[in-house]
Every structure is written in C-alpha cells, then in structure tokens.
Image (cartoon, rainbow, N blue to C red):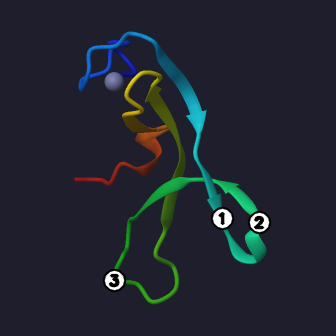
Amino acid sequence: MKRTGKCPKCGCTDIIADAKAIDRGHGNSQQEMSVATFRKPEALIFKEKQETTVSAWICSDCGYIEFYADHPTRIKLPK
Ligand SMILES: [Zn+2]
C-alpha cells in the first residue's frame, strides 16, 4: 500500500499516507506506537532493545490499515 498507493482490499487509490498511531502509556500519556526486537532476549537486564516507531497507511474508502516500521533496519537482528 505504501509503495503501490492502492488499497489491496478494495482497490481504492485514495490512501492516507504516514498517519501516526498513538499509544496510551502510563497516566494516559500519549506516545507514538513502536515495535521492538531484542538482540539478547534471554538476558535478564541488558536485552539490547532495538526500537522504531511505526506509521500507518489507511484506505480512505474502506478503512483498511497497514502499518510500516519507520526504520526497519534499526530492528533487524544479526543472522
Ligand atoms: Zn480499501
């Protein structure tokens, strides 16, 4: 959807790009939604968290939403 500019569900091409997903944290504080991976998930403290915010592409016709990581390379794990 981000690259094609077209909704995969209904075929509409009127896409709302780069919308921010708002997460509610402690005390109802707002923060951008993010995703994370851990280089050392088995570690007790230093799990080496890698994080990126996400943005949404939304179909203005049917409302279908696709999420994309803003910086996918940041959360990539070594093979
Ligand atoms: Zn659609």
Type of the residue with mark 2: Ser
Which element carries disc 2, helix, strand or loop? loop
Query: Which comes before the other along the chain, label 2 or label 3?
Result: 2
User: At which x and y percent is residue 24?
Assistant: 66, 64
**51 relative position to 29: left or right:** left
Instruction: Identify the residue under disc 3.
Output: 42
Q: From the Cβ of disc 1, is ligand 1 less than 8 Å away?
A: no
Q: Earlier in the sequence, mark 1 or mark 2?
A: 1
Between residue 66 and residue 51, name the one nearer to us. Answer: 66
| Residues at discs 1 and 2 in contact (Cβ within 8 Å) | yes
Q: Quadrant of the N terminus?
A: top left
Q: Amino acid at mark 1?
A: Arg
**Mark 3 or mark 1: which comes first in sequence?**
1
Look at label 3 and name its amino acid.
Answer: Glu
Distance (Cα) linking label 3 and label 1: 27 Å
| Mark 3 neighbour density, 10 Å: few (under 14) some (14–19) many (20 or more) | few
At 67% from the left and 69% from the top, the residue drawn is 25
Mark 2 or 3: in front is: 2
The residue lying at 42 percent from left, 50 percent from top is: 75
Instruction: Work out how far the residue at label 2 is from the one at label 3, CA to CA, in angstroms.
Output: 30 Å
The label on residue 29 is 2
Residue 65 vs residue 50: left or right?
Answer: left
The residue at 77%/65% (across/down) is 29
Report which residue position mark 1 lands on. 24
